[in-house]
Image: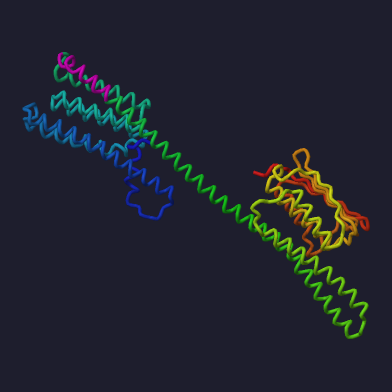
Amino acid sequence: MPFLLMYNKSMSEQNITIRKSPQENATAEESQDNIRVANTFFTIVTILLSYASLYEIFSGSALVSYSRLIPFMVLMAAHIALHWLSPRFSTSAFWRPVYIGLQAILGLSIVLISQSSTIALALFASLIAEQIGMIGFRRITVIAIIGFLGLTFLSYYLNGGLELVSAMTAPSVSTFVLLIVFMVMFRQQFESREHTQKLYRQLESTYEQLSESAAQIEELTLTTERQRLARELHDTLAQDMSGLVLQLEAIKHHLGSGNLERIETIIDQAMKKARRTLADTRGAIDDLHLEVEAPSLRTVVRNKAERFTTSVGIPCHLDLSVPELVSVPYQIREHANRIIDEGLSNIAKHAQASQVWLLLEQAQGELRIELRDDGIGFDIESETPAGHYGLQGIQERADLVGGTVKIESDLEIGTTVKVVLPLKEPV
């Protein structure tokens, strides 16, 4: 926006002292700059016209007569005042032509009273500069420039005839050309600066939005991770510790009756459950540690299978057809790890299986996970029992990265969970 257009708005806002955002502060600083530029321009115009007026008054011209001097001073004061008020008129398509017409009438009247070519040149040159600085080269500006040029030479003709017109043509043309070129260059520089400030404000706004989005993503990530840990701890510590308490109570009961065989069986079961709980807890704790250099996906899955077999006692047969870590995006790899963890944990707790098969394959831009057991299976049409979050967690993780989950299960035959994850990280 040209500096003169901003002047009126800036003046009305300069006394506001409420707390503002950085972007609003930048806009306020720009408004203050526009005020300073506009004030400088109007001050120069005032000084120029005042000097020209005083020169004509004391040079023994037609203004020695009070009948001419008083109207001249009144009209000149009105003309200068309108210059300072011009930003108010420039914001309206209706009042702008009115302002131009009024200044043209005042200028021509002042010239006729003073009978001075110097006053004519100073008046109409300042009006041309003002119009260019105010609204740029629009149609009304071009019309105003042509009109003011015409009034300038008309003033010469009325005050001195063709002889004065001929004498003033060369200096007037050179003055107007230099003035117009200067104002055009100044306006281009001003608009370039304004455009740069606008881009800077947009960058600041974009940075703030990105910061807010990053904070929201971080909060969402933490919330999701808390939910996952809550599910894992509920299925490991809460349930397994409750089972251990019940088994200890059963041991206490059988001690009273001397049923050592039953006590030994319960102790074996409790020891297996304690090992499994310890392994699951260690896995959850390991997930909380930030690994500076993560091992390959093949190594991670192989370690998971070995830990599962050691802690639970169920053989896990691996079929790994996936390259090293570099070919799998970090986010996809992390979700794949968690999906395998939850699948193995679900088998250990509920499947009552004797064998587990884990397939991991990377092909056609996808990472495929297939986890199969020969356990008791379940009815996939029925609702998931309360407290069993494993399958729900697998589905949620797959949804986060645009993957799919397919579950097949038959009673007394086993369950197969098939997960497909796209290798391209979601945007």
The picture places residue 102, in percent across and down from the top left corner, at 26, 31
Q: For the stretch drawn in magenta, what is the main secondary structure? A: helix
Left or right: 276, with 155 as reference point? right
Instruction: Specify whether residue 29 is painted magenta.
Output: no
Q: Residue furthest bottom?
A: 256
**Residue 169 part of the magenta segment:** yes
Pick the quarter of the image with the C terminus. Answer: top right
**Residue placed most toward the observer, 258 or 42:** 258
In-front residue for pair 177/282: 282
Residue 203 percent coordinates (x, y): 48, 42
- What residue is at 6 percent from the left and 30 percent from the top? 64
The correct choice, above or below, for 22 with respect to 279 in the image is: above
Q: Specify whether 25 is left or right of 286.
A: left
Residue at screen point 89% across, 82% down? 254
Classify residue 365 by image quadrant: top right
> Does residue 188 sit above or below 222 in this rendering?
above
Residue 200, relative to residue 121: is it above or below? Answer: below
Instruction: Name the image quarter holding residue 182.
Output: top left
User: Looking at the image, which residue is at 60% across and 56% down?
Assistant: 219
Horizontal side of residue 137 vs 81, given as left or right:
right
In the rendered structure, which segment of residues is drawn in magenta? Answer: 163-178
- Quadrant of the image occupied by residue 352: bottom right
